[in-house]
Amino acid sequence: MAILVTGGAGYIGSVVVEDLIGKGEEVVVLDNLSYGHTQAIGADVPFYEGNIGDSELVTRILNSYEIEACMHFSAFAFVGESVEKPQIYYQNNFVETVHLLDVLIKNNIKKFIFSSTCATYGEPQYVPIDEAHPQFPTSPYGWSKFMVERALIDYDAAYNLKYVAPRYFNACGATERCGEHHDPETHLIPLVLQVAQLKREFISIFGDDYSTPDGTAIRDYIHVSDLSQAHILALEYLRGGGDSQFVNLGNGGGYSVNEVIEAAGKVTGKNIASKIAPRRAGDPSRLIADAKKAREVLGWNPQIPDIESIIESAWAWHLTHPNGYGS
Ligand SMILES: NC(=O)c1ccc[n+]([C@@H]2O[C@H](COP(=O)([O-])OP(=O)(O)OC[C@H]3O[C@@H](n4cnc5c(N)ncnc54)[C@H](O)[C@@H]3O)[C@@H](O)[C@H]2O)c1
């Protein structure tokens, strides 16, 4: 039996593919390479270049492999872009996912693991944020993910689709082979490392007057390998007949922008220049996960919670891949 991984040429998907293969699982990757990198997929992993909403292609894959479950990472994930171009976000993240789900259901594949996000919560009403926190996203990106979550609830009720939908906080870090190469890059740690690599003059700190100890915003950073382990546990959980679940994936702590910059300076031994910029609309002061449920339901136990170890892994990858996956 094989696992269909959509978005397996992307950052998080490629790490999960690597770990699934390491566990002896059979994997098939579907990615349209809109943002993915073929170099991120192991040479021996069957790879189909195409769109998740291409029902004919997905049917062909399902006819060629005995697919047991689908891990669905593919999406567009730039919050700012989603505000300017909501149409492509609703189309790619929601409509295409519904097409994918329909083909899976038609072929009786009823185990589904979906990359959701803390962006479905919107402005936090309290922290740490647990799964019962109200969901009112502040961007079309967040809504597009929320709409998939809603569809999953209804598909479970009507078609018995069983899902685990992890809501990631800030994914970061790297394995030896797979790292973060987004273009454009919007995530703090790779941007800070670009300053260390002299690819960027300085890092902008968006707001230093938040109600946090050092005035900069606090986020919950979670190592991509810890995220990956949660997906493998989610697969086991569904195999064991577990019920559908939404679970937060974060460390339950948080680091401020200043703390991340300081840690990156320490890890890289470089001076990380920074400049204060105005706050960005919709950026909350703190986003911290309450991830008790993932620990209880999945038996998840993140191994790399401290920011220096996370940055060390990312820095090691950037040193061996100075142009990311580019030549
Ligand atoms: N990176 C984070 O911190 C973070 C946080 C919360 C949630 N997420 C979610 O996790 C998932 C993976 O994120 P990532 O950082 O690895 O992103 P990524 O852009 O690196 O990977 C996404 C992959 O999906 C592919 N893709 C996009 N649309 C597709 C389509 N219609 N058909 C086939 N392939 C398609 C892209 O080519 C890319 O390889 C996304 O769903 C994202 O919304 C990420």
Image (cartoon, rainbow, N blue to C red):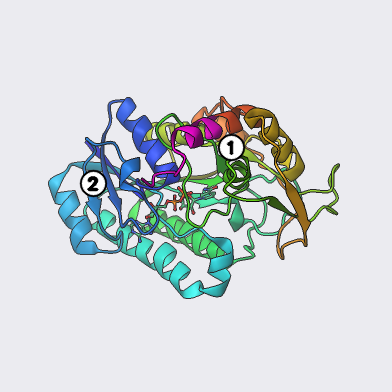
The crowd level at tag 2 (other Cα within 10 Å; few <14, some 14-19, many 20+) is many
The crowd level at tag 1 (other Cα within 10 Å; few <14, some 14-19, many 20+) is many
**Could one spot residue 174 in this view of the protein?**
no
Is 116 or 280 nearer to us in this picture? 280
Q: Secondary structure at mark 2?
A: strand
Establish if 34 lies above or below 245.
below
Instruction: Tell whether circle 2 marks a residue whose Cβ is less than 8 angstroms from ligand 1.
Output: no
Place residue 253 in its image quadrant: top right
Quadrant placement of the N terminus: top left
Q: Disc 2 marks which residue?
A: 47
Q: Disc 1 marks which residue?
A: 222
**Could one spot residue 317 in this view of the protein?**
yes
Distance between the alpha carbons at the discs numbered 2 and 1 = 27 Å
In reply to whether residue 303 is colored magenta, the answer given is no
Is 315 or 211 nearer to us in this picture? 315
Q: Which callout, 2 or 1, points at the residue further toward the start of the chain?
A: 2
Tell me what residue is drawn at x 23 percent, y 57 percent: 106
Is 262 or 45 nearer to us in this picture? 262
Say left or right for 301 vs 183: right
In magenta, the rendered stretch is: 313-327
Tell me what residue is drawn at x 48 percent, y 51 percent: 182
Q: Disc 1 residue type?
A: Ile
